[in-house]
Image: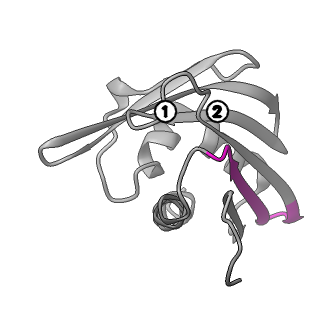
Amino acid sequence: MAGSVREGIDITREVAAPRDRVFAAWTVPEDFAAWYGGDADVPLDRVSMDVAPGGAWSLVIVVPGTEMPFHGVYQEVSPPERLVFTLKDAGAPEGTEGETVTVTLTEKSRTSTEMVFRQRGGNLTPEQYAAAEDGWEAFFDALDTRLAAR
């Protein structure tokens, strides 16, 4: 895609878990903290989730010597198929709502779910989107591990 301008992230994955379980992994603090951040630590006592339209969420990823806070607001909560929320980190431009994340879950079978992830906002450079996509892929690997352990 030479010459194209990157404006977001699109990831589609097949997850080996029922749709309601995948939705819970996005909306239950214990589950979310277990996979968000990949191999980094997300202390459960630093996770807050009011999973309802207009509700806020926040967490802190802790890596040795650094804390990375993330937060946002839920815009749409439609269990178990769709979740839309804003996402900001400490580096987000002041005065913006940050990025918008949309997660759509489609049941493929009793034990398999298609997860379509989109992040939009236009607040990142193409290089930052590429790095963020790599981060999300690592997070989703951790999500797969979390769901396989249940």
Q: Is residue 114 magenta?
A: yes
Name the secondary structure under disc 1.
loop
Give the camera-side residue of 117 and 114: 117
Which comes before the other along the chain, label 1 or label 2? Answer: 2
Instruction: Return the x and y of residue 117 as percentages of the image width and height.
Output: 71, 56
Q: Is residue 98 magenta?
A: no
Instruction: Return the x and y of residue 146 as percentages of the image width and height.
Output: 50, 57
The residue under the point 47% across, 35% down is 92
Task: Name the residue carrying label 1.
Answer: 93
Query: Is residue 87 depicted above or below 25 in this figure?
Result: above
Q: Residues within 10 Å of mark 2 (few under 14, many from 20)?
A: many
Q: Are marks 1 and 2 in contact (CB under 8 Å)?
A: no
Query: Is residue 78 depicted above or below 101 in this figure?
Result: above
Query: Is residue 36 depicted above or below 109 in this figure?
Result: above
Please report the bounds of the magenta region as a residue range.
107-122
In what quadrant of the picture does the N terminus appear? bottom right
Q: Residue furthest front?
A: 3
Query: Is residue 144 depicted above or below 8 in this figure?
Result: below
- Residue 12: image quadrant is bottom right
Instruction: Return the x and y of residue 97 as percentages of the image width and height.
Output: 62, 27
